Amino acid sequence: MIILNGKEKEQYLDLSLTELLEREGYDSRKIAVEINGEIISKSIYNETRVKSGDKVEVVSFVGGG
C-alpha cells in the first residue's frame, strides 16, 4: 500500500511514477511530486518506482494574476 495525497492506495505498487500519474489523470507538466519528503525531478519520473509504504504527494500548479 502507498499513501497518495493522504489516501491509501493498493493498486499502484511497483508502478513507475509516470504510470501512477497517468492512471490518476494528472498532467505532469502542471504538477510537482514528492515521495517520502523528497521532491522528484520530472526527468526521472519514468524510472522512479512506487514501493510499499511510500507517501506520495502531488501538488498542482495554479496560475493567477
Image (cartoon, rainbow, N blue to C red):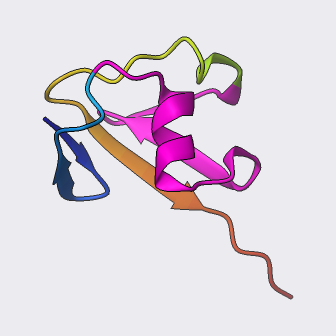
Q: Position of residue 12 (x, y in %)?
A: 30, 34
Residue 60 placement, left or right of 58? right
Which residue: 40% across, 17% down?
A: 49
**In which quadrant of the rendered image does the C terminus lie?**
bottom right
What is the number of callouts on the image? 0
Residue at screen point 48% across, 46% down: 23
Q: In the orientation shown, which residue stands out farthest toward the right?
A: 65
Is 26 in the magenta? yes
Identify the image quadrant of the N terminus.
top left
Q: As rendered, which of 39 and 20 lies closer to the eye? A: 20
- Among the 4 quarters of the image, the one containing residue 42: top right
Q: Position of residue 11 (x, y in %)?
A: 24, 38
| Occupied quadrant, residue 36 | top left
Query: Is 32 or 11 nearer to us in this picture?
Result: 11
How far from the left and from the top, in percent, is residue 43? 71, 20
Question: In this picture, is 29 found above or below 50?
Answer: below
Look at the picture and state if 50 lies above or below 3.
above
Which residues, given as a range, are shown in magenta?
14-42
Q: Residue at x 70, y 74 (%)?
A: 62
**Is 59 placed left or right of 8 in the picture?**
right
Residue 44 as seen in the image, left or right of residue 39: right
Task: Say whether residue 52 is magenta.
Answer: no
Q: Position of residue 48 (x, y in %)?
A: 48, 16
Asked if 64 appears above or below 40 in the picture, the reply is: below
List the single residue furthest toward the bottom.
65
